[in-house]
Image: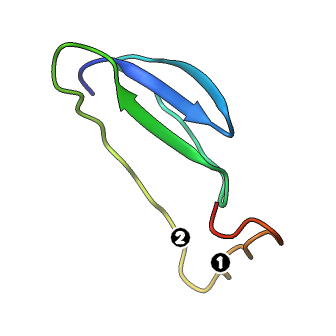
Amino acid sequence: MEGEGTWTLDGVESPAKQGDVLYVEPWVFHGLVNTGTEDLLFFVVKYHPKNTPLPQEPKGSHGR
C-alpha cells in the first residue's frame, strides 16, 4: 500500500513497490522486508473457503 521493500518468494528476491499484489501458494516460503526510508504498509488476505481441506504440509519441509 505504501513504501518500498524486497519480496522474497521461494528464495528469489524482487523489488516491492506500491500497488504490487503477490499470490503465494500454501507452504511456499515468503517474506517482505522494508528497504526504504519510510514506513512500509502492506495488506494481507488469507483465504480458506469453508468445507475445503487444508493443503498437506510437504514431506521434509518442517514448517518451512
Quadrant placement of the N terminus: top left
**Where's residue 31, x and y in %?**
48, 41
8 to 62, vertically: above or below = above
In terms of depth relative to the viewer, which is nearer, 60 or 24? 60
Callout 2 secondary element: loop
Callout 1 secondary element: loop
Q: Which mark is residue 6?
A: none
Q: Residue at x 67, y 35 (%)?
A: 11
Check whether the beta carbons of the residues at disc 1 and disc 2 lie within 8 A of each other.
yes
32 to 4, vertically: above or below = below
Task: Give the quadrant of residue 17.
Answer: top left
Q: Amino acid at mark 1?
A: Leu
Task: Give the quadrant of residue 14.
Answer: top right
Give the residue furthest to the right: 59
Q: Residue at x 24, y 28 (%)?
A: 40
**Where's residue 53, x and y in %?**
68, 82
Earlier residue among tags 1 and 2: 2
Q: Which mark is residue 54?
A: 1
Q: Residue at x 55, y 73 (%)?
A: 49
Quadrant placement of the C terminus: bottom right
Give the residue furthest to the left: 38
3 to 1, vertically: above or below = above
Q: How is the image coloured?
A: rainbow
**Where's residue 62, x and y in %?**
69, 70
Gap in Å between the C-alphas at discs 1 and 2?
8 Å
Q: Residue at x 53, y 35 (%)?
A: 22
In the rendered structure, the answer to whether residue 31 lies left or right of residue 28 reads left
In the rendered structure, the answer to whether residue 46 lies left or right of residue 2 reads right
Q: Amino acid at mark 2?
A: His
In the rendered structure, the answer to whether residue 57 lies left or right of residue 41 reads right
Around disc 2, counting alpha carbons within 10 Å, would you say few (fewer than 14), some (14 to 19), or many (20 or more)?
Answer: few
Which residue does the numbered mark 2 point to in the structure image? 48
